[in-house]
Amino acid sequence: MKILIIDDEELLVKGISYNLETEGYQVVTGSNGFDAVNLAQDPDVKLIVLDVMMPEMDGLEACRRIRQFSNVPIIMLTAKTEDMDKLLGFDCGADDYLTKPFNILELKARIRAILRRTTKRDSDTRITHGTIALDSQSRNAYKDSEAVDLTAKEFDLVELLIRNPNRVYSRENLLDIIWGDDYRSDIRTVDVHIRRIREKLERDPASPEHILTKWGVGYYFKV
């Protein structure tokens, strides 16, 4: 599998590349946001590790531009620790976040977890409820038969809800299931992803028909 590593810290890029190549991944590297956008257009790319703070074009802007043509999973790297910076990353379309300095074993574990989810195949590939349809084999989503681009985490989240209609999941449950129980994040991460999913799949995101909130509890998919 081909993975992009985009960071302006040369030594860090070399270290990540070496560790991933020893795991059997094909690694392509870049040092700024323009590299990220250009290299992400390769259809063989399966995942991007993208630094936030870079010259010329930062990672957030690169992530926004990549999301205009690709739903490839993106893990953001940053030296910042503020929750707002993480929420901005998710709002741009990132799937995961890792704060520097980090353990390379944790990065590899997150890469494996994301790739397992994004490459899995399900025998029941097509699910349709109302105006929303998912194909778990191609990982495509549709609204009123029109294709909609979802990030890897967005797809995982809506697939979980649509496969378990009317079951209410708390934000903590969704963090554990979709991001993993070792994922340390604010529960607002879930709210950001739900909002983005509604904007993409609901006819009226302000008055959703399917992806609903159970106030004080969590979220569920209504059929």
Image (spheres, grey):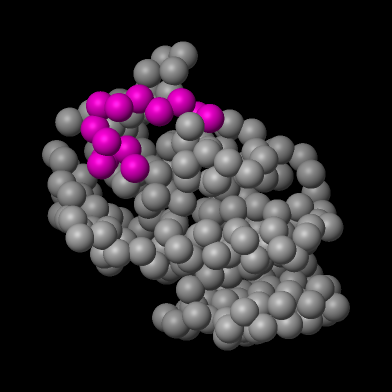
Decide whether residue 78 is among the magenta residues.
Answer: no
Q: Which of 14 and 63 is in front in this view?
A: 14
Q: Does the magenta stretch include residue 162?
A: yes
- Observer-nearest residue: 8 or 180? 180
Residue found at x 75% / y 65% = 104
Left or right of 136 on screen, residue 100: right
Residue 17, quarter of picture: bottom right
> 116 above or below 141?
below
Return the x and y of residue 56 as percentages of the image width and height: 74, 71
Report the magenta residues as a range.
Answer: 160-172
Residue pictured at 55% horizontal, 46% vertical: 180
47 left or right of 31?
left
Q: In the rendering, at what x and y percent does residue 148 appear?
A: 30, 56
Q: Is residue 80 visible?
A: yes
Q: Where is residue 195 in the image (x, y as percent from the top left)?
A: 44, 36
Left or right of residue 172, residue 56 in this image: right
Specify the quadrant of the image occupied by residue 214: top left
Front in this rendered view, residue 142 or 171: 171
- Which residue is most to the top? 216
Q: How many marks?
A: 0
